[in-house]
Image (cartoon, rainbow, N blue to C red):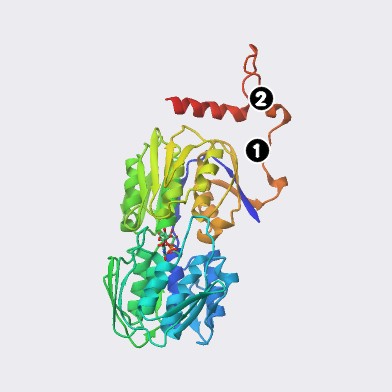
């Protein structure tokens, strides 16, 4: 296992390019199962999650190989297999995206339930409700979803849940409905750009879909779909992460390959926080000078602030000049990063689905533990903006969803080293000497200056009282 050793305090300056969207690539790869012929996908990022889904597709009778030019070719060679095994699905819950395509094309599917997740309860009841409405018989046995439908028939499906619509659930129902007999309407469909990207590829394949990007989709089923060549949209979450990185380090980044419309909510938050953000075509220029201003932010379904950027914005606002409130209405328990940010000196209190952040002027390097994909990005950004050295452990979470993030950040001035997670690699600066471990007595008149690791706690107190 690797860890990242980060030396903070360097403003990021330069140009970086955003890769293809993970959350678009995964359902699109799964949808290749419904096509006749070879699907060629450009812009699929090189990520652990993509490798995992490639394994799932191979286990389902498809070949999934990278060409020399980086494009991913997927071709179904055997229509018989229908099992997505627990050993693969437990590694990545988006494997559940094969359920709709399998049902649509092969009329049966056996897909493991994904199991627990660090960002909160993530049921798939809405996926199953939608597929049942199309006529699938579904049972859950031994941890697997068994689905079968000799014939899928179009129906009216409502996909709204307590926390809004479902992104991968909409992808699953859409990918099944394109081959169903007759017309399906999906109301309360997810409007995320990743769903639109999937829909656009299905349309190019011959599907008949109206209303993409709106909560009401109309799908007229067709007999068969032909494989196409498709380019995945740029990753708006990676772009937003880089924008926050520029703001947090008080740097200046030019970020290429972005879709400004996909970044409207995050851009608004960053501007209110005092960041200068300008777009020229598909390029963003982001610059920040002073401390961020406090902002109240709520993560909502698209076009709101994405829950996948909530942790990064929480890290930014930990350095704001005042109190911010960050609420997550999509995943109300997605706050595992808070205790780790507090190890860096942030002052944050969680109340239900909200984080109350009392901004502090500086954070100081520490050893922290990543709990999930976006939490690890937030910790990396916080470490870049902290004084001294930090260590981020369990960094495999980061590799699931960001393509060479530390290399991109290093190319614009960050100082990040990837080393094996070993005590010998722990920086000296994070190992307290015997002298530093002794706490001075408070009533002594000749008390020596407090040790380094206490000074920041004092600063925090000062901030709280302000
Ligand atoms: C996708 C994204 C993930 C992002 C999330 C929300 C992919 C591969 N992943 O995940 O990065 O954080 O959208 O934008 O695209 N829910 C139910 N029942 C269901 C399904 C979902 O109650 O059947 C709830 C979830 O618990 C959550 C909310 O609905 O509170 C949104 O979840 P959903 O949109 O389904 O997330 P994913 O598609 O799993």
The answer to which quarter of the image holds residue 59 is: bottom right
Residue 347 x, y percent position in the rendering: 48, 35
The answer to whether residue 136 shows anywhere in this view is yes
Tell me if residue 77 comes above or below residue 280 in the rendering.
below
Q: Residues within 10 Å of mark 2 (few under 14, many from 20)?
A: few
Query: In this view of the protein, which residue sits in the foreground, 448 or 289?
Result: 448
Ligand 1 within 8 Å of the CB at mark 2: no
Disc ID at residue 430:
1
Q: Residue 63 at x, y = what percent?
A: 53, 81
Kindly report the distance in space between the C-alpha atoms of the residues bearing marks 2 and 1.
Answer: 17 Å
Q: Dividing the picture into quarters, in which one does residue 388 lie?
A: top right
Q: Where does residue 132 sit, x and y in percent of width and height?
A: 39, 77
Residue plotted at (35% across, 40% down) = 295
Q: Residue at x 40, y 33 (%)?
A: 321
- Against 62, is 344 above or below? above
Whether pointer 2 and pointer 1 mark residues with C-beta atoms closer than 8 Å, the reply is: no
Q: Which residue is mark 2?
A: 439
- Give the residue displayed 32% in from the left and 80% down from the top: 207
Residue sitting farthest toward the top:
445
Q: Which residue lies at the image location 51% right of the left edge and 50% below the top edge?
A: 375
């Amino acid at each position: 296992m690797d860890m990242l050793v980060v030396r903070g305090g360097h403003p990021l300056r330069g140009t970086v390019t955003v890769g293809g969207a993970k959350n678009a690539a995964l359902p699109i790869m799964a949808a290749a199962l419904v096509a006749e012929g070879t699907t060629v996908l450009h812009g699929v990022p090189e990520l652990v999650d993509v490798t995992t889904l490639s394994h799932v597709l191979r286990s389902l009778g498809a070949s999934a190989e990278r060409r020399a030019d980086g494009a991913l070719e997927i071709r179904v060679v055997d229509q018989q297999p229908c099992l997505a095994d627990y050993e693969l699905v437990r590694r990545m819950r988006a494997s559940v995206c094969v359920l709709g395509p399998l049902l649509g094309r092969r009329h049966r599917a056996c897909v493991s339930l994904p199991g627990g997740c660090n960002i909160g309860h993530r049921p798939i009841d809405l996926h199953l409700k939608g597929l049942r409405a199309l006529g699938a018989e579904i049972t859950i046995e031994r941890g697997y979803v068994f689905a079968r439908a000799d014939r899928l028939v179009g129906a009216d499906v409502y996909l709204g849940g307590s926390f809004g619509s479902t992104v991968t659930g909409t992808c699953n129902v859409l990918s099944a409905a394109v081959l169903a007999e007759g017309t399906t309407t999906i109301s309360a469909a997810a409007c995320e750009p990743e769903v639109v990207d999937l829909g656009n590829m299905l349309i190019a394949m011959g599907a008949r879909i109206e209303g993409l990007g709106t909560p009401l989709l109309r799908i007229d089923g067709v007999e068969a779909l032909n494989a196409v060549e498709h380019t995945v949209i740029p990753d708006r979450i990676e772009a937003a992460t880089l924008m926050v990185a520029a703001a947090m380090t008080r740097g200046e980044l030019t970020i290429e390959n972005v879709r400004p419309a996909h970044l409207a909510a995050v851009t608004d938050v960053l501007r209110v926080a005092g960041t200068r953000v300008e777009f020229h075509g598909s390029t963003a220029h982001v610059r920040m000078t002073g401390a961020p201003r406090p902002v109240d932010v709520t993560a909502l379904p698209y076009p709101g602030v994405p829950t996948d950027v909530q942790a990064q914005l929480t890290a930014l606002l930990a350095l704001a000049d005042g109190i911010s409130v960050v609420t997550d209405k999509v995943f109300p328990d997605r706050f595992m990063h808070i205790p780790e940010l507090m190890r860096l000196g942030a002052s944050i209190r969680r109340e239900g689905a909200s984080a109350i952040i009392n901004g502090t002027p500086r954070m100081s390097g520490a050893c922290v533990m990543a709990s999930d994909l976006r939490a690890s990005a937030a910790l990396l950004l916080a470490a870049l903006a902290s004084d001294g050295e930090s260590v981020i452990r369990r960094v495999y979470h980061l590799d699931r969803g960001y393509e060479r993030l530390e290399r991109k950040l290093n190319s614009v001035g960050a100082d990040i080293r990837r080393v094996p997670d070993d005590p010998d690699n722990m920086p000296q600066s994070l190992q307290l000497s015997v002298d530093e471990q002794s706490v001075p007595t408070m009533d002594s008149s000749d008390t020596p200056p407090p040790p380094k690791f206490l000074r920041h706690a004092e600063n925090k107190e000062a901030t709280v009282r302000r």
